């Protein structure tokens, strides 16, 4: 790391910790030490401070030891005339900056300065702020503010099921628009190809199960040449039921894999897929497993099955 970068990082850290200390002292004087401090919709207090220091900040006075810890991490700006080590000192100052920055944002919430207002701007989901999002208050336009637990969980699900958005970075300018489009299509083709392979694998699994049932029946008939016709008929009926069940499960699974929930949650948040849930349904082919897409609201966490009543009636799923 260059001395140029280190000097500016250390200078900025000292300035930010000083700003946090001044804001905290003012807030303690005006609001009192018992004033509650929190980011909305999170169970982890002020998460960075809690994770790095173990201090669970719930009130303004809980920020006092945090700022003291940040001050202990500060170092003087490296001298231009005498070489001294500065890499570790710069990293310490970086941690002090993070602690101070989160403390500042928490104090800004107390004074109503977070989330930042942006008139006319409407989030498509995000953290819910009833005092701003209520129609009675005119739905004040605002930015998202801190990332909350619900958003983190929904992104974690997207990362697992492959819906996490991605991007292709081209170093330098693309030679032409056609080249840029080609790179994008190539990347999407890789993803789409994997999805097609997954579908092919599912189909092969069903076909493999059918073949196994047939081969087992023929092997039994070969090993029991003296069996009665009624026994063969019973065996054939059993194989037909096994094959019918497998085909029916596969067909219903295709219909149960809804890609999107059409409507939004009552809170205004968008539905994000959280996986598939199984139910057992009695049919003419016996009991089959019905897979239903399960969604959660990215804002409030409410669960939702998007099957319409007509579908529920069709498959007998409550």
Image (cartoon, helix red, strand yellow):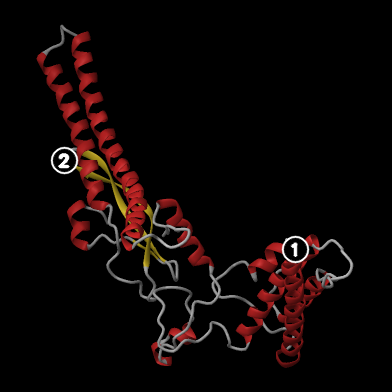
Determine whether the residue tagged by mark 2 lies in a helix, strand or loop.
loop
In the picture of the structure, the residue carrying the numbered disc 2 is 284
Q: Which mark is residue 183?
A: none
In x, y percent, where is residue 200?
Answer: 27, 39
Which of the 4 quarters of the picture holds residue 106? Answer: bottom right
Q: Residue furthest left?
A: 229
Q: Which mark is residue 91?
A: 1
Of callouts 2 and 1, which one flags the residue occurring earlier in the amino acid sequence?
1
Q: Residue furthest right?
A: 82
Relative depth, front residue between 144 and 209: 144
Relative depth, front residue between 58 and 175: 175
In x, y percent, where is residue 221?
Answer: 18, 13
In x, y percent, where is residue 39?
Answer: 59, 75
Q: Quadrant of the N terminus?
A: bottom right
Look at the picture and state if 138 lies above or below 159.
Answer: below
Image point 25% across, 41% down: which residue? 288
Which mark's residue is nearer the viewer, 2 or 1?
1
In x, y percent, where is residue 51?
Answer: 68, 62
Image point 44% across, 66% down: which residue? 301
Image point 34% across, 53% down: which residue? 188
Determine whether the residue tagged by mark 1 lies in a helix, strand or loop.
helix
State left or right for residue 23 relative to residue 313.
right
Q: Are marks 2 and 1 in contact (CB under 8 Å)?
A: no
Look at the picture and state if 58 lies above or below 26.
Answer: above
Which of the 4 quarters of the picture holds residue 54? Answer: bottom right
Relative depth, front residue between 134 and 79: 79
State left or right for residue 275 relative to residue 112.
left
Image point 22% across, 25% down: which residue? 211
State left or right for residue 127 relative to residue 267.
right
Relative depth, front residue between 206 and 234: 206
């Amino acid at each position: 790391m260059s001395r140029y970068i280190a000097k500016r990082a250390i200078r900025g850290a000292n300035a930010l910790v000083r700003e946090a200390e001044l804001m905290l002292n003012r807030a303690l004087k005006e609001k009192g030490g018992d004033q509650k401090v929190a980011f909305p919709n999170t169970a982890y207090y002020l998460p960075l401070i809690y994770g790095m220091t173990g201090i669970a900040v719930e009130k303004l006075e809980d920020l006092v030891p945090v700022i003291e810890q940040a001050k202990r991490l500060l170092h003087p700006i490296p001298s231009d005339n005498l070489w001294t080590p500065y890499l570790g000192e710069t990293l310490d100052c970086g941690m002090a900056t993070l602690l101070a920055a989160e403390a500042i944002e928490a104090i800004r919430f107390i004074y109503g300065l977070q989330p930042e207002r942006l008139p006319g701007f409407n989030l498509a989901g995000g953290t819910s702020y009833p005092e701003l999002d209520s129609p009675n208050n005119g739905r004040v336009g605002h930015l998202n503010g801190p990332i909350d637990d619900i958003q983190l969980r929904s992104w974690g699900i997207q990362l697992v099921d492959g819906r996490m958005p991605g991007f292709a970075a081209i170093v330098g300018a693309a030679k032409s628009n056609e080249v840029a489009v080609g790179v994008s299509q190539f990347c999407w083709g890789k993803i789409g190809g994997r999805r097609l392979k997954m579908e092919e694998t599912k189909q092969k699994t069903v076909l493999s199960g059918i073949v196994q049932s047939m081969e087992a029946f023929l092997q039994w008939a070969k090993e029991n040449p003296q069996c009665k016709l009624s026994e063969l008929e019973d065996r054939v009926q059993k194989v037909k039921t096994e094959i019918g069940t497998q085909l029916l499960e596969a067909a219903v699974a295709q219909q149960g894999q809804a890609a999107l929930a059409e409507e939004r949650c009552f809170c205004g948040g968008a539905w994000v897929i959280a996986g598939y849930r199984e139910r057992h349904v009695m049919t003419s082919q016996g009991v089959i497993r019905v897979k239903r897409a399960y969604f959660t609201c990215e804002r409030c966490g409410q669960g939702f099955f998007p099957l319409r009543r007509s579908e529920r009636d069709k498959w007998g799923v409550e």
